[in-house]
Amino acid sequence: MEKISATIPLDHFVSVEDLTNKEVLTLIKRAAQFKKGTISPQVRESLYAVNLFFENSTRTHKSFEMAEKKLGIEIIDFEPSTSSIKKGESLYDTVLTMSALGTEIAVIRDSKEAFYTELITSPSIKCSIINGGDGTGQHPSQCLLDLMTIYEEYGHFDGLKIAIVGDLKHSRVAKSNMLMLKRLGAEVSFSGPARWMNETFSEYGQYVAIDDLVPEVDVVMLLRVQHERHETHDDVNVETYLDDYGLNETREKKMKPSAIIMHPAPVNRGVELQSSLVECDRSRIVTQMSNGVFARMAILEAIIAGRNKAAETSY
Amino acid sequence: MEKISATIPLDHFVSVEDLTNKEVLTLIKRAAQFKKGTISPQVRESLYAVNLFFENSTRTHKSFEMAEKKLGIEIIDFEPSTSSIKKGESLYDTVLTMSALGTEIAVIRDSKEAFYTELITSPSIKCSIINGGDGTGQHPSQCLLDLMTIYEEYGHFDGLKIAIVGDLKHSRVAKSNMLMLKRLGAEVSFSGPARWMNETFSEYGQYVAIDDLVPEVDVVMLLRVQHERHETHDDVNVETYLDDYGLNETREKKMKPSAIIMHPAPVNRGVELQSSLVECDRSRIVTQMSNGVFARMAILEAIIAGRNKAAETSY
Amino acid sequence: MEKISATIPLDHFVSVEDLTNKEVLTLIKRAAQFKKGTISPQVRESLYAVNLFFENSTRTHKSFEMAEKKLGIEIIDFEPSTSSIKKGESLYDTVLTMSALGTEIAVIRDSKEAFYTELITSPSIKCSIINGGDGTGQHPSQCLLDLMTIYEEYGHFDGLKIAIVGDLKHSRVAKSNMLMLKRLGAEVSFSGPARWMNETFSEYGQYVAIDDLVPEVDVVMLLRVQHERHETHDDVNVETYLDDYGLNETREKKMKPSAIIMHPAPVNRGVELQSSLVECDRSRIVTQMSNGVFARMAILEAIIAGRNKAAETSY
């Protein structure tokens, strides 16, 4: 019988880079055990969470909701468009309110980078904060589910060759992924339009043309062309992007037999990935979505453990 | 003691016309038994449904929600306006996502006719699909609750005279109702502005002027003037519509003593129906709304039975 | 051991002024007992409530939701922007629908004054109505939580000096508060821009310039400048309002040592209240938000008691 590792206590979950490799692996293993059904934690009654999504989301928002329900956490709905946000109330005062009402966990997505800093340092806000994506900053729960999906496939990170391909400039998951993958022992390379590369990325891996990269790697991790974050739409030619920089069927045939395709979704079908490949055998895109629920259960469990620990030590 | 009929297993519920008369009557009887409280099904734990309404709705949306709660089904909220739909994600990819997250039932209303075809044939989508209204196509749960309401009143369909009156052209419930009522043995007639009649309707019944029709029938089933589906509003004169084509107090007085008024609602008070008649003695409009919850419980129960059966046979 | 007072049965909760002083004190005491955890009522199963907020709200909406969840009431979500309201359905027909679907309690905020009158006199609507704010009319649950917060602080109302300061003209809580506070024995004064004063207020207290008022009172109850209800924005100079009429640090230092600051929130930080004072020692603004949940539990409990009583007497 597989050893069940205990969770780790966390006060907040705002950046995956703050965690040690061991902590990341613990969360991944807990997530895998939730997936297998080998653990089913008892959450104390009347634990309330609020999900505050100030940017559009399906996967992240709904998988946190599913994870909360599976853990028995009560959810307070929050719809920014009908809240006092519309009367000019700030994020800080909104979270302060939800904290005063008795919610203990706030999962937040906001367009402002590092929005969470003022929240976790407030003397009045008692909520634990989970970062569901901060502008073009980070997206730590996505990073964790990506790592979980790779670990599930290969059982390790050491020496894995991983290509991160596409809209590196606007992606909030690319930066966390390159940093964490390197730290965990994988070898990262980049591709996509060269103008989206950034000098700081060279610390983590090198740029390789897509046709040279695809046959060599274990994972092709595609990024979404984030039309909504581009200043002008015309910097991407959606007619030619797939053949110039994306993964089409021709390139897919050149991948190693065991190599997998990943994408955080939503996919621009026919832009960064040929539509027929979304649900192909080597695609792990649907698996990533499923794993997201379990990764978020592991995050929430760690937050609850952190709150329980803090409650004990305050006596 | 009344015999309790077992439910029928369904994979999806997208069109009432796909069901046999016997299956329809089974669903109606189960709904009636939910209403009486003579049955209270045990749903297995952790069964998740998502309600995806891409067109405005109060009755259908909220009565599915109520039915789900009464059956112990966990609901994942879905608000299209804050989802990745806004980033251009398709209905197909949205349902694929919700399926990957672990929802087993998706109740969907969409403006596209037969939107469900690609969903129920997908190799990757594992959700059962319930059609909550497809454009001007069908609205099978509304048809079922209408049939339930008539059956509750008369105990049979044979030889009942039923008038379907009003915006036949844009109604998604009229077509199912005329087909099913005829198949179940009722005699259907139509009224309303003649330009909304359609040659295909003559297969099911004939057009009769409203004043000739009203005194003859057992049920006056009014349809909503669907302003929002008309290309121009000026084809309906709301000042004269009631007296020209609608049910006003004068006509209501000429109805048979036992005859009832039905309307799927929302009612345009004063247009197709005089406002004072909405809550009158022979109106079953409030009853229809109440019955909608029980009819949808019967549909959901049949879907769950279908999923349980499929799970068994897959061993 | 403190005596636990029984709740009072209410049919609806639309105006706090309809209650006797004794009834108000009973609700306040029940709320305090919910806060202490000395009572935990058993709500019968399958009791459904709907929260219909047609005006933006965070505190009121979410604290009713929290109170409902804590009492074990099932919540049917209602999002006006995706409902049949958008097809022109009226508030009356919407509540009639929710009643027909089986919801027993409707918490409603609407911009129309006394919107509830037609609802509580309808022969067809079976819901109990709770007023979550009617235009510039009343906001009785806010009044109750304000009274609870003062009572929690001082243990009585007799002879307390209370300043109500700010946008008296557009506030729906000011009128209830001045009436109830006077009736309960407190001494009320007003301040803020004189043009927002109203002759009818002089029945309850007198206008005093802010600098004369602040050192004298036990409670400074600030009101939000309701930009969204003003016909033009330029009647308030947000640059000078704080120093002319608001509570800044200089004035706060002149308050009695035991005096407290209240505000229904959201606060326009830097307009009616200096930002640094929102979370200061003598501020009870966060406490008011927390108390709101318990005050609303007491209201809901009284409504449920009223429904249970009505059900018994109908036999």
Image (cartoon, coloured by chain):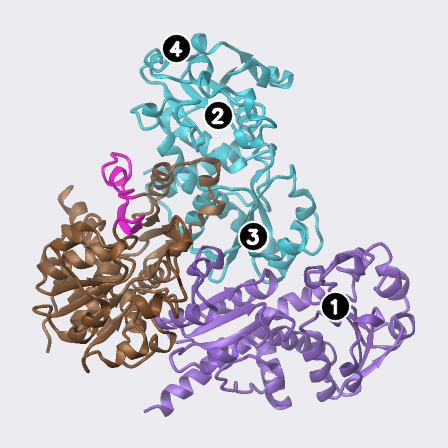
Chain colours: A brown, B purple, C cyan
State the image coordinates of residue C189 (x, y, percent, origin top left). Answer: 51, 15
Instruction: Look at label 3 and name its amino acid.
Output: Ser
Q: Give me the disc on residue C223.
A: 2
In the foreground, B109 or C286: B109
Q: Which residue bears the numbered disc 4?
A: C215
Is the Cβ of the residue at disc 1 closer than 8 Å to that at disc 4? no
Instruction: Look at label 2 and name its amino acid.
Output: Leu
Quadrant in the picture for the N terminus of chain A: bottom left
Q: Secondary structure at mark 1?
A: loop
How far is disc 2 from disc 1 in space, using C-alphas?
Answer: 49 Å
Q: Give me the disc on residue B223.
A: 1
Give the number of the mark in front: 2 or 3.
3
Q: Chain of mark 1?
A: B
How far is disc 3 from disc 1 in space, using C-alphas?
Answer: 23 Å
Q: Secondary structure at mark 4?
A: helix
Residue projecting furthest to the top? C212
Specify the quadrant of the image occupied by residue A276.
Answer: bottom left
Res. B155 in view: no
- Asked if residue A127 lies in the magenta stretch, the reply is yes
Q: Chain of mark 2?
A: C
Q: Residues within 10 Å of mark 4 (few under 14, many from 20)?
A: some
Q: Which residue bears the numbered disc 3?
A: C81
Q: Chain of mark 4?
A: C
Label 3 and label 4 in one chain: yes
Q: Residue at x 43, y 28 (%)?
A: C268
Left or right: A86 as drawn, with respect to B230: left
Is the Cβ of the residue at disc 3 closer than 8 Å to that at disc 4? no
Instruction: Look at label 4 and name its amino acid.
Output: Pro
Give the number of the mark in front: 2 or 4.
2
